[in-house]
Image (tube, helix red, strand yellow):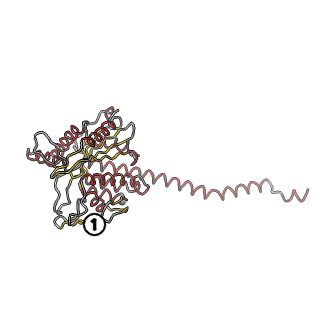
Amino acid sequence: MEQQYESMPSRQSKANYKKGKHKKKRPFFRFFIILISSLLILAGAAAVYLYYKSSEAIGQISLPKDQTEVDPAQSVKKKPVAIALLGIDARPKGVKGGGMNTDVMMVASFNPATKKAVVVSLPRDSKIAVEGYKQRKVNGYYAAFYSNARSNKKEKEDAELEAMAKIREELGKFFGIDIRYTATIDFQGFVDVVDALGGVDVDVDMRMKYKDTYDGTDIDLMPGRQPLSGQKALDFVRYRQSNDGSNMSTDFARNKRQGQVLGAMFDQLMTIGGIMKIGSLFDAVGNNMKMDMPESEIKNMITAYYNISRSDIEFITIDGTWKSPYVYLKDDSLKAARNAIQENMAE
């Protein structure tokens, strides 16, 4: 018993032992607290940075600058909204070619209750009549509206706003819905956005080779699934035919490619790598996109649909027949597209 007693630590020894153990744990505990605190600070800084970048980009995108607030009950967070999306064939300064034609024309509807979107692509050569204007391909109307406004001595921004309002009014009549806003983006904006996302993976459906020394176009794509840079993605959606007239592509095929690339962009954005590039994405959009939606509503759109995925978006292309110089849309295909976008607008 004496031997056992002597081998047992005293109360003081026990206290020192426990104190020693506690001292061993403390450095790790401090490191853990510092690590968590640092991560929280970085997360907060990132949130502030992204908020600043998004606000800066939204301020550049939104027209006009003297804006009125939207009734909260009518906000895009509460009500379905339709937007005309126009890709303008504008080129960087010093590059030949291009103009005000809208070579990409889409109408998108968003429903905040279902978190679903329907995007309808309209062939650029579609024959659509507009009262008071000479008959032309649908992709020429925005330029005509803008030119008419400028001829009436309107400033550039006011002319853009008038053209945006007029094109959405006509497209709204055509699809049987109320289109509240219009967004335009130029070729360089498309390239910059894709590059900001780190490129996109798409399945190139045919051999594409076309060169035009006049405007510097140099399309050279092999068939098959592959990653595309911004410029290559633009080549993919723009391709019409090879120089020798082979591998001809139709408006309908180009519209399908537009949907394919947009879907791939959504997929890329939802990856961790894509999320980390949001700052660059805001820069790309802010420099090249214009929208007649108030800044507060653009922020509401981001809030309402920030987590929308490719599976939530239905891409529709309208079929038709081409008879030079127009595309004549097929009644059944047009009716299906109208029904889909109208149904998504239902409350």
Residue appearing at x 39%, y 53% in the figure: 269
Q: Quadrant of residue 145?
A: top left
Which residue occupies the foreground of this view, 321 or 173? 321
Image: 292 above or below 277? above
Quadrant where the image shows the N terminus: bottom right
Residue 211 relative to residue 15: left or right: left
Q: Position of residue 51 (x, y in %)?
A: 36, 48
The front one of 345 and 329 is: 329
Label 1 sits on residue: 220
Residue drawn at (33%, 60%) of the image:
204
Give above or below for 347 relative to 200: above
Residue sitting at x 16%, y 60% = 97
Please state the horizontal and vertical placement of residue 283, each as a whole percent of the image.
Answer: 31, 55
Q: How many marks?
A: 1
Q: Position of residue 187 (x, y in %)?
A: 24, 56
Name, please, the residue furthest toward the right.
1
Callout 1, which amino acid?
Asp
Front residue of 73/262: it is 262
Left or right of 9? Residue 278 is left
Q: Position of residue 188 (x, y in %)?
A: 25, 58
Mark 1 neighbour density, 10 Å: few (under 14) some (14–19) many (20 or more): some
Q: Say which quadrant the C terminus sits in.
A: top left
Q: Which secondary structure, mark 1?
A: strand
